[in-house]
Image (spheres, rainbow, N blue to C red):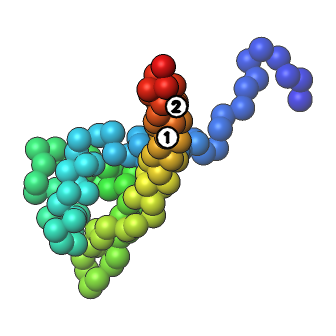
Amino acid sequence: MERGWLHYSIPTKMKQPVFDPFQAIADPSRRQILHLLSKDSLTINALAENFDMSRPAVSKHIKILSETGFITIENIGRERYCILKQEGFNDLQQWIDYFDKFWLVKLKKLETLLAEKAGKQGLQ
């Protein structure tokens, strides 16, 4: 078959966006979902009752939180329960810990420099 300007291939499956933990918590609705789940595990329908949006919209937020490791969904009987999970929070904590250490080193260097400068001024 000759490949002319009219020939093109159609992707068989659209690539799904990949979210990192910070993108997941950037949305206020997702942060509220996490807050609600910190009190108790809830069904998707029970979560949806707390929002002024459609159930499919809430389900989309839940899917993102699940894919980034913040929640897991368990089937219990006929209900699907959302439960907080540690993984997404661990990713956030590792990032924060890195910068905590970064700033502690910088502040310690500043403290040392200021102490040396104060010592030199005291000698004069």
Mark 2 — residue?
Answer: 116
Residue 73 located left or right of residue 39: right
Q: Is residue 65 above or below residue 1?
A: below
Indicate the position of residue 22 as horizontal and vertical percent values: 41, 43
12 or 46: nearer the eye? 46
Residue type at the position of mark 2: Glu
Q: Which mark is residue 61?
A: none
Residue name at image x 49 percent, y 40 percent:
108
Residue type at the position of mark 1: Lys
Indicate the position of residue 10 as horizontal and vertical percent values: 66, 34
Quarter assignment of residue 82: bottom left
Quarter of the picture containing the N terminus is top right
Q: Find numbered disc 1 in the image and state the secondary structure of the residue it sits on.
A: helix
Can residue 63 be seen here? The reply is no
Q: Residue furthest top?
A: 5
Indicate the position of residue 124 as horizontal and vertical percent values: 48, 19
Q: Find numbered disc 2 in the image and state the secondary structure of the residue it sits on.
A: helix
Mark 1 — residue?
Answer: 108
